[in-house]
Amino acid sequence: MKGVIILKIGRVIVYIILIVFLLLCIGLFILLKCCNLSYYVILSGSMRPEINIDDLVVSQNLNERDVYDALNVGDIATYFDGKDYITHRVYEKEIDSKTGLGAFVFKGDSNNTIDRNTVYSTQIKSKYLMKIDRGAYYFEFINSIYGIISLVTILMILFLIDNTLVYSINLKIKGSNKEQEDGSENNVSDSDQ
């Protein structure tokens, strides 16, 4: 009976691992969507030492109308220059007298000069919240065929472990029931004599 309890505890542990894994995946998706967050993989060292190559940056999406008030000099933000998404620090900000839009000058922390072009509030996508060190590796792995195969394999292994535990529990229960039946038959035989 002790073996059955241990096997049942093992089965509970397998289910806990599965549930935690699923909750993390679902939670991350919900967090990104509900909290209006974006993530970016950093491809250059222009923001060292604050942000490094292959870090995963999590940012709060900004509405065009709120960009000017949301960003201050010294904040890190991501903007689109027409070709690439760039994550740099706000170096200057002002209202453009011609367009009436917020006009920003950005600079990478490790760059010697400011970014070439003025960036308008319509180009700014998000404000930096946090980074995940080397997060690009996890992101790229999970989005690759190898990552998908690995996740499916892990789920299959957990499923096989669960089935093995169920089978072992059933064998233990059958074994203990058979021992009880054999014991009761022996008692009946002894009393008949």
Image (cartoon, helix red, strand yellow):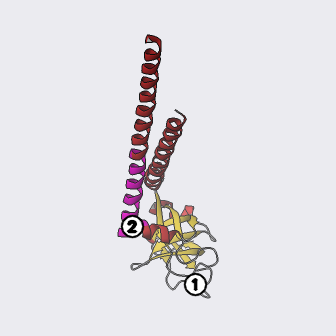
Of residues 142 and 161, the one drawn nearer to the viewer in this rendering:
161
Left or right side of 106 for 11: left
Residue position marked by numbered label 2 in the rendering: 143
- Residue 144 in view in this figure: no
> Considering the numbered disc 2 on the image, is that residue within a helix, a strand or a loop?
helix
Q: Nearer the viewer, residue 90 or 2?
A: 2
The image shows residue 37, relative to residue 75, as above or below, that is above
Residue at position x 45%, y 36% in the image: 172
Are circles 1 and 2 on residues that touch, CB within 8 Å? no
The disc label shown at residue 114, or none: 1
Q: Where's the C terminus, which quadrant? A: top left
Q: Position of residue 2 (x, y in %)?
A: 55, 35
Q: Earlier in the sequence, mark 1 or mark 2?
A: 1
Confirm whether the magenta stretch covers residue 159: yes
Asked if residue 154 is positioned above or below residue 119 in the image, the reply reads: above
Q: How many residues crowd mark 1 within 10 Å: few (<14), some (14–19), many (20+)?
A: some
